[in-house]
Image (cartoon, coloured by chain):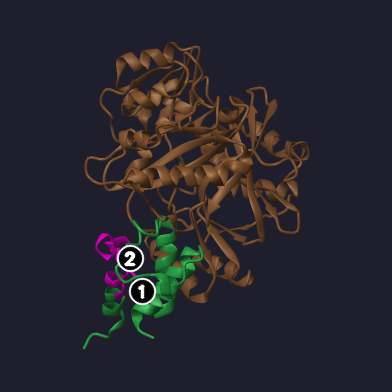
Chain colours: A green, B brown
Amino acid sequence: MDIEDRVKIVLAKVLDNGTTAEEIGSDADLVEQYGLDSLQTITFLLAIEDEFDLELDYPSLQLDDLRKVSQFSAFVARLATPVQ
Amino acid sequence: MTIRFGTFGAEAWWRPDDLAELPSVGGRDSAVDAMDELLLGFCAPGDLLITRYPIHPELLANLGHPIRHQAVGKPEAGPVERSIAADDRLRDAVLGAATVTPFAVLPDTARLVGQSLPSAEVVAQVNSKTWSNELVLELGLPGAGRVVRTPDELVDAVTALEFRALVKDPYGVSGRALLEVTTPGVLRAVERVLRKQADAGRRVELLVQEKLPKLHDFSGHFELAPDGTAEFLGLQQMTNKGFRHLGSHRPPPALVDAGWYADSLAGVTEALAAAGYWGPVGIDAMLLTDGSVVPVLEINARQSLGLLTLQLDQRSALTAHLWQLELNLAPGEGITDVLTAFDGLLSTGDQPGVLVLNGSTLAAPGGRVYLAIFCRTDDLDQWRRRLVAAVNAAGLTPRGMTDAA
């Protein structure tokens, strides 16, 4: 399963409103389309850390450029790839 | 004459600066600064409402009775009380008023108003979840949690609950109030963020509660007199999205026996009075799936949206339902477009319909509008759908409505 699919599964769990991972589009905007609020956002990020075994630096996280599922998945892919 | 004003997000001003914070994203939400216009819903005829920003004239006109309104001349950063104190005319009006009713008593409120309010230190203390949890333990009420003061204690407490745990900040500032910790991985992330702050000298103080099987959230509302007498005002059943408050309304009588609930909180109101608090109190509670009640989840020793809904409810023969609508807005769109969308659906409570309670500063890319929907409870879903259809028809798109009404 690729990273974007795993991100969508995590997002569907956080939304907890009946939306399935399959229904979430790559270009879906987390705020405009799904109304992700600040509490859901932090829950989503903590679950992403758990899913991908990452460590996010919350104070420096700039989420405005990561609102689309595809953008966020690319960000996770960069963090999950070991530096060569 | 009664003067009303207030600072929403009061918890941020009660919270000690040296407390470590739960993981969070984003800075402070500036929309909170404009929420004081919701106090419009509390106003009786002739009241003077002072707000940080001007209120759209149509919101004032739609209220259904005349009130007086003033916006502060120069909004300053921080609580609105600072801006009022800096304005000679408004400060004199507050000092000369027969009754001053702030949303919450902050240090700035106490400095502005003086002796007729409880001390800000007492108000901050009794609004802390640490204080309310100690009271729950002392009174032997169900649902007590554990206050943890180190990252290791947090790990112990969450693990002991087998990851059915809610971790709460003692002051619950919006957006960073609580986290549900369901896996060891999430616990490790929370522990890491806290340990970093503890190592830098910040104090850890968090409440860990078991996540219980909830049927409904509700709140009980009281007015405590300076002599300690408590008047029970009523209950509100809350509508939540996850852990976020979306609105509230009068519960059906079968939900909870209001008289029993009020009586069971006698120890709580006595403790508030003994601590030196008087004024409005909202106590959040929970009805569990087995029919039992957790009577005190948190104490809000201030006005609240539940109290606002209760007061709106009392002005109408219909039931008042508070509801929030989050909208995406294009440049140039604002509250006028929302009011136009609701043309023909507006009400002051005299007939089924909607009263728009805020939104004067609403602008692109969007924001939240609070609405009071007056209708029979059975008709609420129909009214929500009608309102969403109205904003859609006007070209305004609601956010996150995949689970709408």
The amino acid pointed to by label 2 is: Ala
**Circle 1 residue:** A55
Q: Label 1's element?
A: loop
Residue appearing at x 44%, y 39% in the figure: B370
For the question of whether residue B16 can be seen, the reply is no
Judged by depth in the image, the label closer to the viewer, 1 or 2, is: 2
> Image point 42% across, 66% down: which residue?
A44
In the image, is residue A16 above or below residue B344?
A: below
Q: Nearer the viewer, residue B292 or B210?
A: B292
Question: Cα distance, mark 1 to mark 2?
Answer: 24 Å
Amino acid type, callout 1:
Glu
Closer-to-camera residue (B194/B365): B365
Dot 2 corresponds to which residue? Answer: A28
Label 2 residue SS: loop
Name the chain under label 1: A
Q: Nearer the viewer, residue B399 or B15?
A: B399
Given the image, what chain letter belongs to the residue carrying mark 2? A
Residue interval drawn in magenta = A56-73
